[in-house]
Amino acid sequence: MLWLSRGRQRAEAGRGARGFDVPDERMHLAVVACGDRLDETLNMLKSALLFSFRKIKFHIFAEQTLASLFEKGLSQWPRPISSKFQYNIYPITFSVGNAEEWKKLFKPCAAQRLFLPVILKDVDSLLYVDTDVLFLSPVDHIWNFLKDFNSSQLAAMAPEHEIPKIGWYSRFARHPFYGVTGVNSGVMLMNLTRIRSTLFKNSMISGGLSWEDLLHPLYQKYKNHITWGDQDLLNIIFHYNPECLYIFPCQWNYRPDHCMYGSNCKSAEEEGVSILHGNRGVYHDDKQPAFKAVYDAIHDYPFEENLFQSLFYPLQTKFLDTVNTLCGRIPQVFLKQVEKTMRTVYERRVVRHMRPRHQ
C-alpha cells in the first residue's frame, strides 16, 4: 500500500541527528488512531516531544484515510522539532481471527494494541498510549521503568482504580482481572522481546500459549463477558500471569476518576501528574475543565516559543477558571511536573548554549 511505504521511506530516509539509528538511543512510542482522533493524536505526539530528552520513534497505526493527514501534520512541524523524532505509519491489521470483529472491539481499532508484539518484530521495547494521553513529564522518565523490571516482568500498567469499593472491575466485572482493582491499559510499557518469548498461563489449556496464539481463543471464550474490550483481555491475561506485570503509580496514568469523586491518587498529590489520560472525552467537553485546560494549552502552544511564557503561564491562567470543580481545586497536581520539567529543559538549554565550541 503506497501510503504505508511512503511513511516508511520517509522515516528510514534519515530523519534526525547522527546516531539516531542506534537502538539504545531512542525510545519507541506507539499509538492507534481511527475515526476523528487525528488532532488528538497529534497533540499527544506534540506533548511527548516538548518535554523529552532522547529521540523518539513513533509507530502510528491508522486508518488509510488518516495516513496522509498524519504525514502532512508531522511534516509541518519545524526542523528543531522534527529532528527529535522518526515515524512509521502502519495500516490497521490483525494477524489472527476475524479482522472486522477485532476492529469493532470496544472502540474502533483499539484492539490493534494487542497485536503490537506480533507486528513490531524488530522493536525490543515499546510504550503504547491511547490517543487521549498527554505527557506532562519527559517520556524518558516512564521509559526508565524498563530498568526496574525483574526477570519475569514484561509489561507495566497502572491500576484501574485506587479504591476497590468504587472501582469498576471490583464491582462489575464478569471475568477474571488483575489484582484487586484491575489495570488500565491506556498507558502500557512493554518489553516486546520478552512478550514474544513467553508462554502465558491461561484457563483454556494446561500448558502455556504464546502471545499470538493466546489472543483469539481468549477472545472467543470471554467475548460475551467483557465490557472494555482489549483492556479486559489484558486483565484476564495478567490475572493468570501476575508475575509478568509491573505496576507503576497512578501519576503515570492520571484520569478523571482520580479526582472527580475527590482526590484519590496519592502519588500525583505528592509528585504531580506525569501522564494525563483524558478518557471519557473530557478534552472536548466542559465536564472536566481542568483536563481541557491542559489539552488546550498544549494544543495552542506555538513550537519554539518560550515554554514558560507561552505554555505554563497561560495554563496557570486557565486553571483559575476551574477552581470550582473537584479536579480543578487541586491545580498543583496538574502543574507540578509541567513546571519541574520546563525548568529542567531550560537548564539543559542554558548549559548547552554555554558550552565552549571546539576549535
Image (cartoon, grey):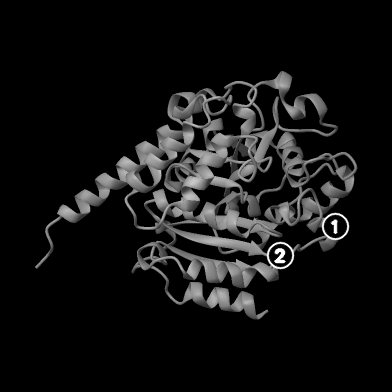
Seen as rendered, the residue at the extreme bottom is 2
Q: Which residue was labeled with disc 1?
A: 101
Residue visible at 83% across and 47% down in the picture: 218
Q: Between 23 and 99, which is closer to the camera in this rendering?
A: 99
Res. 159 image quadrant:
top right
x, y percentage for residue 158? 60, 35
Describe the element under mark 2 as helix, strand or loop.
loop
Q: CA distance from mark 1 to mark 2?
A: 13 Å
Amino acid type, callout 2 = Ile
Residue visible at 42% across and 71% down in the picture: 15
**Quadrant the N terminus occupies:** bottom right
**Quadrant the C terminus occupies:** bottom left
Q: Which numbered disc flags the more N-terminal residue, 1 or 2? A: 2
Q: Is residue 147 above or below residue 181?
A: below
x, y percentage for residue 312? 38, 41
| Label number found at residue 78 | none
Q: How would you rate the neighbour count of disc 2 (Cα within 10 Å): few for under 14, some for 14-19, many for 20 or more?
A: many
Q: Which residue was labeled with disc 2?
A: 92
Q: Is residue 275 above or below residue 209?
A: above
